[in-house]
Image (tube, grey):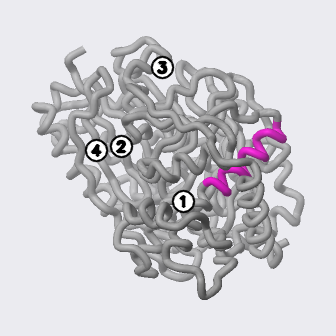
Amino acid sequence: MSKKILVIDEGTTSTRAVLFAATGEALGSCQRPLTQHYPSPGLVEHDAEEIWNLTLECAREMVAKAGGADQIAGIGITNQRETIIFWDARTGHPLSPAIVWQDRRTADQCVALREQGEEPVVQAKTGLLLDPYFSGSKIGWALNNWPQLAEAGDHLRVGTVESYLVFRLTGGAHISDASNASRTALMAIGSGGWDDGLTDLFGVPRDILPEITDCAGQLGTTKADLFGSLIPITGMAGDQQAATIGQGCFAIGQTKATFGTGAFVLTQTGTTLRQSKHRLLSTVLYQIGGERHYALEGSVFVAGSLVQWLRDDLGLIGSAAETEPLARSVPDNGGVYLVPALSGLGAPHWQPNARGTIAGLSFSAKKAHIARAALEAMAHQTHDLKTAFAADGADWAELRIDGGMVANDWMAQDLADILAINVERPAFIETTALGAAMLAAVGAGLYPTLEAATVMRGGVTRFQPAMPDTDRQTRLSGWGDALSRVLAPSS
């Protein structure tokens, strides 16, 4: 197994290419930041041409590092989910800005549909809720508001980011893997196909949508002129599903949490589709050989982006790394709680119009207390999710964490303390890219199954709860009070 795996990891704030050995060792990476566009409050967009150009630039650098395209067994793609892109099938060029998963422009439409009684039908078919987070309402909005899309006529195509990248990499394949398709609110999650009732509800013509495929296998082949020769595309999954795979969560009940731009918790439920009664999501974890494995998911919209906001917009810190020593410099949060509803609240509250708050400020509050409160918000939001999972009969025995934020030892320990369970962090925390590599390795025939590919995962560090229960209850009570202030105007 001397051949390598190339992973394209197209995230919300950056795009990367990572070169893996078949053993799971990361051999190199190239990363470029993505420009964030905020046309008005609640709107978030990307330049889809920038996504393509930076992705190609990073991929080419890693192909060169591998020693050429013939040294790569397959390409794995993982991506920010729910973000949608429209393009012209004749050129592959985008016809509009990409509407990012964080975008809230269809909040009122989703509320109206909910008031019309449509949410139970949507949830039963898709496992999702009526929220602007998901792709269907975004696609319908764009078709009604951007005239250039209608002008493209029969040449109009739409897809999530992996679909767009595959189209451009292959020169015309229009596909979407089942994990990403399940996040559009247009796919019937039980049957695995687009649903006419859902496409009609959101006003999306079925003929502009991609074909839904497996997450591993021979999915396409790159154009020869991109990398010097052909490379097969053998794995695809949405970023959170890929991270769950990278964490080796293949037994029913195993759970991971990724703390990136947002925070996303997925619990493996096997081949059984479980519907939540506590406003969690059901999603396709992966599909191989036509067999779908599912997960329950809780989505937090603001995690690492909160620290980025403290740094870039408030100037409170100079770097994300400063948050750990600041948190350790004070004995507690000083009564300060930060509810980071900067783009609404996700699960289990689903309040798209909620706005953030910093509660408990006094003259004794320092920068360190606010930084600590920001980190504490990660554990508090995750605890809210754990409560909902438990109510659905899927409580967590342990939690496997990853993403850029969890390099912070203080935050990892705080999660263990507030959740009162063991927390496990892999030595290689970029498990989203690793999961895509595992899928691609299976699709390329380097491993027979995903379970066999878990040898790629490597070692872990464990954090055990150590906080006195009285301190834990004080924290949870203070968070509940602050959260109630945010939820009250929207309730």
Where does label 4 land, which residue? 17
Residue found at x 51% / y 34%:
462
Q: 41 above or below 286?
A: below
Q: Residues within 10 Å of mark 2 (few under 14, many from 20)?
A: some
- Depicted 293 relative to depicted 349: above or below: above
Q: Of the residues under marks 4 and 2, which one precedes in the sequence? A: 4
Residue on which disc 3 sits = 450
Question: Can you tell which mark lies on residue 303?
Answer: 1
| Neighbours of disc 1 within 10 Å: few (<14), some (14-19), many (20+) | many
Q: Nearer the viewer, mark 3 or mark 1?
A: 1
Q: Secondary structure at mark 2?
A: loop
Using the rendered image of the protein, determine whether residue 85 is visible from the camera's viewpoint.
Answer: yes
Q: Is residue 88 left or right of residue 281?
A: left
Q: Residue furthest top?
A: 448
Check disc 2 and give the amino acid type. Gly
Mark carried by residue 172: 2
Is disc 3 placed on a helix, strand or loop? loop
Q: How many marks?
A: 4
Task: State the predominant SS element of the stretch in magenta.
Answer: helix
Residue 443 position within the rendered picture, expressed as x and y whole percent measured from the top left: 40, 22
